[in-house]
Image (cartoon, grey):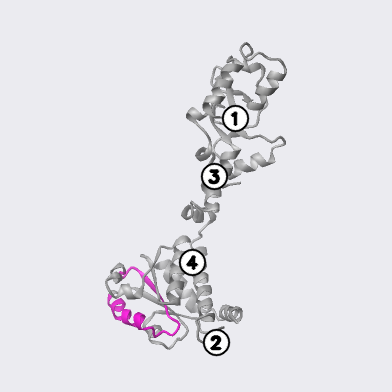
Amino acid sequence: MEAAAVAALAERIDGAFDDAVRAILACEGRVITTGIGKSGHIAGKVAGTLTSTGTPSQFLHPADALHGDVGIVSSKELVLLLSYSGETEEILALLPTLKQIGPKMIAMTGRTDSTLAKASQVVLDVSIDREACPHNLAPTTSTTVMVALGDALALAVMQARDFQHADFARYHPAGSLGRRLLLRVSDVMRTGDELAIVPESSLLIDTIIAITRAGAGAACVVNGEGQMIGLFAEGDIRRSLLRGCDPKTTQVSEAMISDFYRIAGDPLAAEALEIFRTLPKKVGELPVLGEAGEPIGMLMLKDLIRAGLG
């Protein structure tokens, strides 16, 4: 029954919906949503969806509004009022004050001839045949239709604003999408004391000490100009010892890997994770090089996982 009501609502979207979208786009202030009971919960949800998709919005409880909170409303705001009957006492009590302040008002109601509808500049019709409740009493179908229309309104405005993935991520920095679209290698890589850098003339024992002090998995080996020419990882320590190398006399240049994987610049951390996944040989760390080929950081696979990307 609820699904059928939403389908029927889609069929009767008309110019009023377009007017509502244009009104929100033209709003110089915030979109204030209000309603009480189930409609109030939906009004709060609509405000949250609008805000997270590029339209500053705020829910205003009608009872609180009548006791001073209506002060957040100015003529620059737009007020979206939700009331299926269009005769909700608290909403009607608010209308005279809103008329005096002068914001544009959009009604979301099931009765287009109601007091609320007559007081509003735009009326969104959410009427239904009956509630899914077996007694046709509990708000069920009507609330589902309100939620669907609220979502449609917010998403139509979002599209009209050309609100993109990166914009969404900016407003959701703690979410997985935000991390994937905002977090860069420079935000995750290890630098400073956590980056082991040794000259090519260093002995293996000194390189091992540098790796241990940094708490790293590898050391970056550089030439006299500071450019990285090799990587010496923990696995190379074992392999050099098995070959009989003396850590106290063997230089790291004799045991380092010259043909090493690397990351250049500052790509998205998610892109770096993909590099880890697609390498023909699995590694736990990748050096990050600057423009001159100098090591500026060490990116650890486990740090990407901890950041919530894996």
Q: Foreground residue, 305 or 105? A: 305
**Which badge, 4 or 2, comes first in the chain's sequence?**
2
Q: Give the secondary structure at mark 2.
A: loop
Between marks 1 and 3, how big is the CA–CA gap?
A: 18 Å
Q: Which residue is mark 3?
A: 307
User: Marks 4 and 1: which is nearer the front?
Assistant: 1
Q: What is the x, y in percent for residue 271?
A: 60, 43
- Tell me: residue 131, above or below residue 62: below
Q: Give the secondary structure at mark 3.
A: loop
**Which badge, 2 or 1, comes first in the chain's sequence?**
2
Q: Which residue is mark 2?
A: 130
User: Marks 3 and 4: which is nearer the front?
Assistant: 3
- Rate crowding at label 4 as few (under 14), some (14 to 19) or many (20 or more) other CA atoms within 10 Å: many
Q: Which residues are magenta?
A: 73-100
Asked if residue 222 lies left or right of residue 53, the reply is right
Residue 287: which quarter of the image?
A: top right
**Which badge, 1 or 3, comes first in the chain's sequence?**
1
Q: Is residue 183 visible?
A: yes
Disc 3 residue type?
Ala
Disc 4 residue type?
Val
Q: What is the x, y in percent for residue 63?
A: 33, 75
Between marks 3 and 4, how big is the CA–CA gap?
A: 32 Å
Q: Give the secondary structure at mark 4.
A: helix
Q: Which residue is mark 4?
A: 157
